[in-house]
Amino acid sequence: MTEQPPAKKKCLGADCENDAGTLQCPKCLSLGIKGSFFCSQDCFKKNWNTHKELHKLASPETYNPFPSFSYTGPLRPVYPLSPRRVVPKSIPHPDYAESGIPGGGRTRSNKIEQLDEKGREGMRKVCRLAREVLDVAAAAIRPGITTDDLDKIVHDACIERNSYPSPLNYNFFPKSVCTSLNEVICHGIPDKRVLVDGDILNLDVTLYHEGYHGDLNETYYVGDKAKADPDSVRVTETARECLEEAIKLVKPGTLFRDFGNVIEAHAKSRGCSVIRTYVGHGINKTFHCPPNIPHYAKNRAVGECKPGMTFTIEPMIALGKYRDVTWPDNWTSTTIDGKRTAQFEHTLLVTETGVEILTARTADSPGGPIPMPTAAAA
Amino acid sequence: MDYDDDAPPDLIETNEVINEEEKPVKVPITIVTGYLGAGKTTLLNYILTAQHGKKIAVIMNEFGDSLDIEKSLTVNKDGESVEEWMEVGNGCICCSVKDTGVNAIESLMEKKGKFDYILLETTGLADPGNLAPLFWMDDGLGSTIYLDGIVTLVDAKNILRSLDDPAGKVEGHEESDEHGHGPVMTTAHVQISHADVIVINKSDLVSEDELQAVQDRITSINGLAKIHITKQSVVPELEGFLLDLHAYDRVEELDKASLGHSHLDKTISTLSIPLPVLTSGQVEKLDAWLRSVLWENVLPGHENAAGTPAFEIHRLKGRLILEDGGEKMVQGVREIFEIFDGPDNSGSQTAGKLVLIGRHLVDFDFPTSLQQTVGLAQST
């Protein structure tokens, strides 16, 4: 987290590799949307139809709660947030549901739990339900829907499955799912932001069911424009592959510090960087517990895989710089240069011989890998 | 207003200058520990009022064992003190690897400009072994601060009594044996065992013999630390004593003669294991040995040592000389360690060394275990 103005700005134009000069969209300036730099009038003109969607988002009923904050990219929070959603008392709540502060997991011990068969079965079940919920929400993604609409879908799907949405009130997180768009690395708060054709959106879902947490996320293309944008596809597919490459290593004896080497090497080979601040984590009866799983190379992470351990790997991959900036909402983490970022996550169980991907996709899961757009002139 | 124009307006010239990202300069942080009365306050007051020409931030009070940080911080520059308040966001500390205290210091520096040095005063009862890992961060995290070292102040008059006082038993460590017998591990022990510099203060209040006894005892616990003896809390030169320690990126002090010759203290000792020139395969094996010892608390070859109290490594340093002329450094605190490339002075060193500081080291045969694991026939 260094000095405020980030590096040289690139032109906002799709596929445009030029550095932006000092030319900015006047509409954005009048709306208080910063950072809308273009390299030339021509490029601006070419991108106008996509770009002007941004102006729509500043509608009169909604507002930017932090107008003086210097955002790193085009995205803005769109407040007011909807009222807090309620989970029926009949569904078992985790300890922080009331207090906001998770208690159980904050021991200083670095001891990593190895689950017995009963624990493993509990994890299998909650992870299967978490996958179902993610798939339900992902199927609803389309231009025109808000991230808050998706929050409601996730929240209701959790309750239908007799599960508590783990993010809700975890360290006072206000919503039931994390929705991270475009330059948001993670922990985006669902609000009134309308999805537009060309966005990429990460949904990070965690359920608490019968005493166990199951955690997964995927990044999805919104509309066909995103699928045709080489950079969006490159960062999203690279993140997907990074997770797959790391999972290939999981078996008893693998060192937690080694995942980052594989992830960073693959990201670099695609011209992407690895976000450093956020890590994968142990997960079982506690939402976040040891081990820490950094995704960057050359880390000193402690510990090795042993049968019965359950943890996440969740690489966040960026098109530009790895550094992050947190919005004044204390949650939303964005890239420092406003460039796009993508993430994928699974909850994994180390077995006696290898790994079980507890949150694996099913044949019907929405999303999934797509090829690079062929017209990729860039 | 109608935002949905059909045609794009003309771009306008804004003359906003866009800066290149600066390469972050890292600011060293020194952790200062010591019992109440050991002279911490005198030392820090000196730093806060003296004309030393440096911009030193002192973080005081209750930066204890927890992840909390009290929000007050005092910055001294040219004899003038300014109190600042740090913002500690709540955020999701669990899935961020950076400690909230680290974040608070970083964001303060972002706003107020860089300090030259940061001193962090712990409570009298703090176990520095819990704090060091928070500040000894991976380079990959790109933090703007780095752990320079740990300085422990002791009071010559009281330290021996503190080391033997069962009431001073440190919290959060496993019992050495089930019945709670045996020598106690006090907070004074862990403050000394994790220290890179130890200041023996108030030496004027004890006789020469007593001072020697204090020195011997401290050296037997921690044979690696630099020792300074002061009178009446007179502060020595800051560089190399409090600042610019480089305790976590260099390993210069391994050649000290005092290493591993005394077991004066029954609880904690320093153990020095000589190592011959190693192949890269042997470095791998040494890494595996360290993983077993530090992560699993298992000494290879002694897996079934039932009834023996568990050992505990607090600090570890090493220098490895490689067959190809290369040199590697080993650094560790508690369960975290790293083997990294050292300065390339090919040929000047012919033997390496691994030094461990910890509890119950004398109850096990560490040298043989290491030599067998790494595959060294010629044990010394």
Image: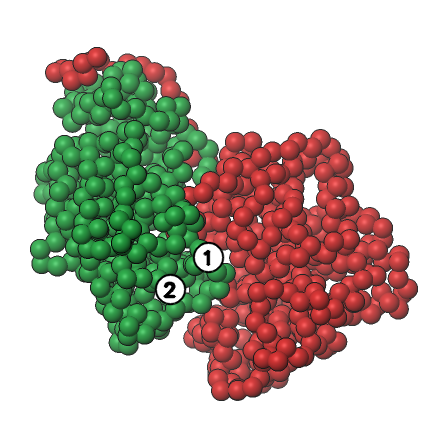
Name which quarter of the figure residue B177 lies in.
bottom right
What number is the disc on residue B144? Answer: none
Q: Is residue B138 left or right of residue B185?
A: left
The amino acid sitting under disc 1 is Arg
Residue A57: x, y in percent? 22, 25
Which of the two discs, 2 and 1, sits closer to the camera?
1
Residue at 51% across / 80% down in the picture? B299
* Chain identifier matching the green colour in the rendered picture: A
Q: Is residue B48 visible?
A: yes
Residue sitting nearer the eye, A152 or A92: A92
For label 1, the residue is A106
Chain B rendered in what hue?
red
| The C terminus of chain B - image quarter | bottom right
Q: Are marks 2 and 1 on the same chain?
A: yes
Classify mark 1: helix, strand or loop.
loop
Q: Chain of mark 1?
A: A
Residue at 37% across / 40% down in the picture? A331
CA distance separating discs 2 and 1: 20 Å
Classify mark 2: helix, strand or loop.
loop
Circle nearer the N terminus (2, 1): 1
What number is the disc on residue A256? Answer: 2
The amino acid sitting under disc 2 is Phe
- Pick out the residue farthest to the right: B207
Residue A233: x, y in percent? 18, 44
Name which quarter of the figure residue B117 lies in.
top right
Q: Is residue A67 left or right of residue B207?
A: left
Residue at 83% across / 61% down in the picture? B157
Residue sitting nearer the eye, A249 or A290: A290
Residue A366: x, y in percent? 12, 50
